[in-house]
Image: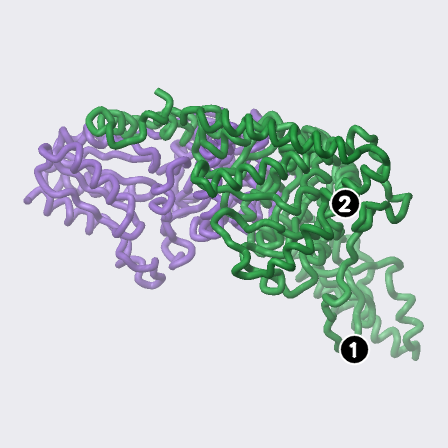
Chain colours: A green, B purple
Amino acid sequence: MGQPHVWLVRKEAWLVSKMAVAISVAKMWRQSRGLGQAALVALRRPGARGLAGSRPSTQQQQFPSLDDKPQFPGASAEFVDKLEFIQPNVISGIPIYRVMDRQGQIINPSEDPHLPQEEVLKLYRSMTLLNTMDRILYESQRQGRISFYMTNYGEEGTHVGSAAALDRTDLVFGQYREAGVLMYRDYPLELFMAQCYGNVNDPGKGRQMPVHYGCKERHFVTISSPLATQIPQAVGAAYAAKRANANRIVICYFGEGAASEGDAHAGFNFAATLECPIIFFCRNNGYAISTPTSEQYRGDGIAARGPGYGILSIRVDGNDVFAVYNATKEARRRAVAENQPFLIEAMTYRIGHHSTSDDSSAYRSVDEVNYWDKQDHPISRLRQYLLSRGWWDDGQEKAWRKQSRKKVMEAFEQAERKLKPNPNLLFSDVYQEMPAQLRRQQESLARHLQTYGEHYPLDHFDK
Amino acid sequence: MNLFQSITSALDNSLAKDPTAVIFGEDVAFGGVFRCTVGLRDKYGKDRVFNTPLCEQGIVGFGIGIAVTGATAIAEIQFADYIFPAFDQIVNEAAKYRYRSGDLFNCGSLTIRAPWGCVGHGALYHSQSPEAFFAHCPGIKVVIPRSPFQAKGLLLSCIEDKNPCIFFEPKILYRAAVEQVPVEPYKIPLSQAEVIQEGSDVTLVAWGTQVHVIREVASMAREKLGVSCEIIDLRTIVPWDVDTVCKSVVKTGRLLISHEAPLTGGFASEISSTVQEECFLNLEAPISRVCGYDTPFPHIFEPFYIPDKWKCYDALRKMINY
């Protein structure tokens, strides 16, 4: 790993000259002995795999003859004399691991994670509470109460299944459609709302658009809008966790669209070469705004890219909470034990629009959406599982729906009534300390508001 | 020490003092293409001084991630000319990390180092001075030293500063500039310009290599024109020391700013604009900018391109005679 390039150039020259000598010596020896191929076999170093992964040394044995294994530093492979391009396999791609069928029944009992009732109920409540919050906040944007919103419809299983398999202190880098991870980690409804409303309670101090959550105590790094930028960052965080012997991994979520960004390629390659304990979790939900996967990539999705980087990869049914859980659990166990990255591609479907700025009926049929909503939804599949175990019933369902809606509405009404943060918070945290120039600008705004304050919505802001 | 040795010394001090500190980038393991990291891998281990794949957006993104956990990340970009793939990570991510999270998260322990400026034969892609692109970005600091002693102190300040910093190292000075540099760590404050020579008639402002050019111009001016120049090394491009520069211009009434980077949108424009706002009535002549032309950095034409002492002297003379 990381052989010094300058040193190698000098060594290469030395080896080439030695090889030339060895070849001519071997040729002469063969000719003088009248020996054929059999003799050449004896000249090969046993177990030689070429120079890939091995260090050239001054004590090198006699260099193998021309007919032997390749010596290129760049690949560990055999020679072949037949011209053949490798065919990418997209017709029968990497298979999709699942535990439950679409009706929530366990297919192979040995794959059942046997989670206790309380845990499965927590998974169910997290998904449904998220769903309820999504409905109410989406509606609130339509009514002009918040400026923007993104729902998580259909992908709740990817969030809670993975979150449940992590340790509480594992660091999460998300994209923007992972609110269920925060929900599973018990992020209060008040704070979800506070961020969406940008009110005085927003830990983010009102600086970002809705759904750009962040929580230090729950190890959820603040969301940013640019796509895939979190991927190489997550790798760096994992490297630091490895150095700190923290027994922590990092999980990095992104969509199949973001996986096209250069930052994704950068992140995968760095994680593999620098041996980082990280799980790359791709939510392949079929669309990047209006762009279907057929226009996003031509290969076998994102899971097929992993091996190209030397990364252990798997594709799972993202709407099967237990499949997501099992894959994440095993990836976590191995990532921390072996210090290597894992790639999980969770296949799912984005039931909602991309955001409140999108109307997806412009590019897909209502029938297609309804299929997923009705026939293959992570919440209904888990509910079926719960019902068949006798851990849930229609009465509890009704009561929970009522209770969760009430909780959300209360938090919502509270959040709406709160003031926005003091406008001075426009200026802080650019740097740790406020530079002189910025302080002057802050004072300039204060003076401006003294004269022109009536034209600004000061009443809604904290004094 | 020469400049690259003073950098090595600063990095050595950092890794010795801060067990979380790591250095990474292309080719840093064997010592770096400019020898700035020689010996550090052997001394501190391969988990602390290591090569990354050839990918600047990855290098900076990776560095941000390390810093987010609180560890110290010292990233090297092989030439400032190649920093642009990392522009998104620097501007949209590093610079905004603390602000956008409401101070829940930050990447203050990230420092990015890159060789900078003309070198005699570097042409388009081994000569650039991109500080102006980053000056326009609140949330990061940009620092450029003029000498080995300055470099070590400023780099140590950047590394310990709680904000992401970009440290540009004038590559032409790596071997050419030699001076006494303490082996022990010391810091030179950021956002403080230095008046390296006091004067009464004209203020000359520059940074990096160009400080030495205007120093020569100052002695030419004294000899040939009897003019006394006040020389200021800006040192930190952003946030910059407005007060020191303005105080000087209030005294002298004349300002000349010089940099290798192209004229239009170059950092001299920011200084010029601010000074004319703050010191308008003190000015005896228009502010003069002596910069590179608005062209990519040429190869064979470098001697004609750079803002050499003759161009600076001529501009100064015109200002005196205004």
Residue behind mark 2:
A381
Q: Nearer the viewer, residue A106 or B21?
A: A106
Which residue is drawn at the image coordinates 53% and 41% (left, top)? A138
Gap in Å between the C-alphas at discs 1 and 2?
A: 50 Å
Q: Is residue B112 visible?
A: no
Which residue is drawn at the image coordinates 59% and 41% (left, top)? A174
Q: Is residue B262 visible?
A: yes
Amino acid found under the numbered disc labelled 1: Lys
Please indicate whether residue A346 sits to the left or right of residue A6 in the image: right
Which residue is drawn at the image coordinates 82% and 47% (left, top)? A100
Residue behind mark 1:
A82
Chain letter behind tag 1: A
Q: Earlier in the sequence, mark 1 or mark 2?
A: 1
Please indicate whether residue B118 sits to the left or right of residue B226 in the image: right
Q: Nearer the viewer, residue A215 or B1?
A: A215
Residue A82 is situated, as x and y percent measured from the top left of the image, at: 79, 77
Q: Do discs 1 and 2 share a chain?
A: yes
Which secondary structure lies at badge 2? Answer: helix
Position above or below: A247 against B307: above
Q: Nearer the viewer, residue A53 or B88?
A: B88
- From the image, which quarter does the C terminus of chain A lie in? top left
Position above or below: B15 against A310: above
Position above or below: A217 against B41: above
